[in-house]
Amino acid sequence: MSLTISVLAQVLTSHPPPEQHRGVALMAERPETSEPLRVAIIGAGLGGLTLAKALQTEATAKKVQVRLYEAWDEWKVRGGSLGLAAGARILQRLGLGKELDAVSNQGQRMNYLAQGKKLSSLAVPGYFAMRTDLQRIVVESLPADTIKLGHKLVDIAESEEGVQLSFENGATDFADVVVASDGIHSFVRQKIFGADEPVFTGFRVLYSVSSKPIRPDPTVANMHWVETAGTGYAILDVTAGQGEGRHDICLIVLGSQEPVSDRWDSAIVRERFAELAKNAAPDHEVLARAVESADVCFDWGIYQQPTRPSWISAKGRVVLLGDAAHATAPFMGQGANMAMHDAWCLSRVLLHQELSLQESLRLYEVTRKAYCENVVSASSKIGQMHTATGLKALGRNYLLKPLLFRNLRNAFGVDPTERNPWEPEPSFFQRLGLRLRALCA
């Protein structure tokens, strides 16, 4: 019986290499060139770092020269903790699995509560780590000459032959393709794609980070929905990292009628966090400890990127990645995951021997754009659920909760390394075959 199932699984999952995927044809017998593809990456966040690492790690016959430019002259990190799922699978594929394990708190269970009453629990198979630790393990794995710190881009000019870059320190560079991973306020996007402004989502997050343990159980995270005086709040407490690198995070999500700065380094008086904590949930023990023990607090306005017709420039030499393309509200925990997934996808197509640069960028956009825009839309809707009041809150607690869980499961279930961008989505029978093969194994 096991043999029969195994044979069936192999038949269901086998299929010839596709000649065409999503309207992008693969060019056969492309002549080889000894000149490397010159890739310049602007912005050394996790998206840019992951792209540089993937381009230099994955074995390929195609030659690629990578330079990563960062405006800051020393390493700085905005933000606190991150939950990685898709991003974790990419780091593991890139040979950083042990380093990821060493800086992460893994496999927490998320409890959902409303007005002090536990509603349900959901296993979250992710890796929770501090952004600075994740950045460090990727930086340390790259050749020293890959990253150019202290290079603030001040001008960019695109032609049919390539892209000219000019930096504030007087340095210049010329690249075949430029990848803009320079965040929600991307200079490259403004210069090449036209001026725009991020859109305020109507949400605000007050966020605390404590290096002193203030949570009783680091293996359990808690999402607590409360309503006070007609205002809905979501209070999340979670642990990132482990050992000496452990940090306990506590944050409050609320609606905001007026736009709040989205700068992580915006000034905040600690009393503001304490006052909101007292008003929102005076009996929340972890929140009370966070007020007393937080090393740092942020007041963070939530913005998202307006949808653009394309992530590829008119001359096909500049492409957007991560927050520069699709900055999102954080309520599905997918901002960094999507940026790293973008990077993985882009690296695969750029390294493909049979794809031209233009074909690679089109395939990247077709593969990622619609998916990311759907996540951006869903994240804002989940934010509305988190801060709902009255009957809407009641509906969230007992009727819409399965929808919330399904979205989170789907997001955490994504494995970017499972197939290549030029391969078609597996059919129902192929997915069934994969499951049968897993059972046989």
Image (cartoon, grey):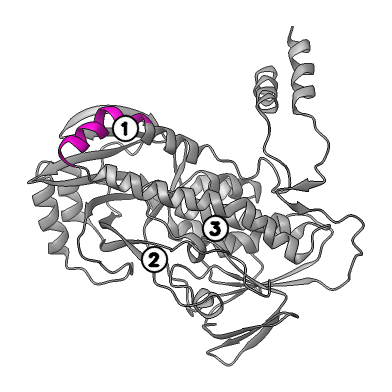
Three-letter residue code for mark 3: Ile
The residue lying at 68 percent from left, 73 percent from top is 317
Residue at the disc numbered 3: 137
Kindly indicate the quadrant of the structure image that contains residue 261: bottom left
Q: Residue furthest bottom?
A: 170
Q: Is residue 295 left or right of residue 87?
A: left
User: Mark 2 or 3 closer to N-term?
Assistant: 2
Q: Is residue 394 magenta?
A: yes
Kindly indicate the quadrant of the structure image that contains residue 185: bottom left
> Marks 1 and 3: which is nearer the front?
1
* Camera sees residue 241: no
Tell me the tag on residue 78. Answer: 2
Assign a secondary structure to mark 2: loop
Position of residue 232 measured from the top left corner of the image (x, y, whole percent): 17, 46
Q: Is residue 235 left or right of residue 416?
A: left
Mark-to-mark CA distance, 2 and 1: 33 Å
Q: Nearer the viewer, residue 201 or 249?
A: 201
Residue at the disc numbered 1: 400
